Every structure is written in structure tokens, then in C-alpha cells.
Image: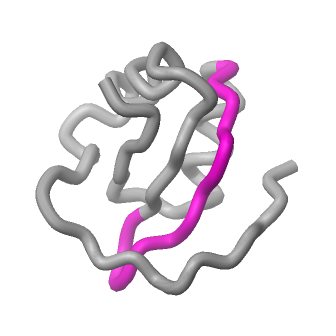
Amino acid sequence: MSRAVNIDATVDHVIATSAKLKAVISAIEPLVPKGTRVVFVNADHTAAVARAYGKLVMTGTVTRSHWVQVRAS
């Protein structure tokens, strides 16, 4: 499994869910027009978050915005 996953949820929601699951985020960005792309430090963390979101995991092509670094705290 890849370390990246696209989820139909807000950035804040993905950060909160990841923290609850102790999944460490490497990079995160909003998708256009909705959703969040998140990269975790390992595939196990990605799998745990993907299981938690279930059908909200987005498959297929997504539109990414211009990358801007954001510090998740």
C-alpha cells in the first residue's frame, strides 16, 4: 500500500482522526473542490486511517492544488 491516501473529509478532520489513531502525518494538503490528500510516515498508518474512513477514501483521479507547506500541530 502507498503511504498517500485521498479522503473525502476536511484537513482538520483528517488531522484529528490521525491523531486519535496515532498515525503520523508526513504531508497533508486540501484537494480541489473537496477532500484531503495525506501522506503518512509508513504504510501501516495509511492502512489504519483508510480503514477508519472506509467509503470516504477517494479512488481515481483527484485535482490537487499548488503545493504549499503547512505545519500540522
Q: Where does the image place residue 13, in percent across and percent down from the top left?
A: 57, 52
**Residue 53, above or below 13:** above
Q: Horizontally, is 46 left or right of 26 in the view?
A: left
> What residue is rendered at 45% in x and 27% in y?
46
Vertical relation: 1 (above or below) 40: above
Which residue is depicted at the point 33% across and 23% down? 51
Q: Quadrant of residue 23?
A: top right
- Magenta-tinted stretch: 22-35
Q: Quadrant of residue 47?
A: top left
Residue at x-position 45% and y-position 33%: 3
Q: Who is closer to the viewer here, 22 or 71?
A: 71
Q: Residue at x 39, y 66 (%)?
A: 35
Seen in the picture, residue 36 relative to 16 is either above or below; the reply is below
Report whether 71 appears left or right of 14.
right
Q: Residue 4 location in percent, x, y?
A: 42, 42
Image spot of residue 39 (x, y percent): 53, 44
Residue furthest to the top in view is 44
Residue 37 x/y as whole percent = 45, 57
Residue 24 falls within the magenta-colored stretch: yes
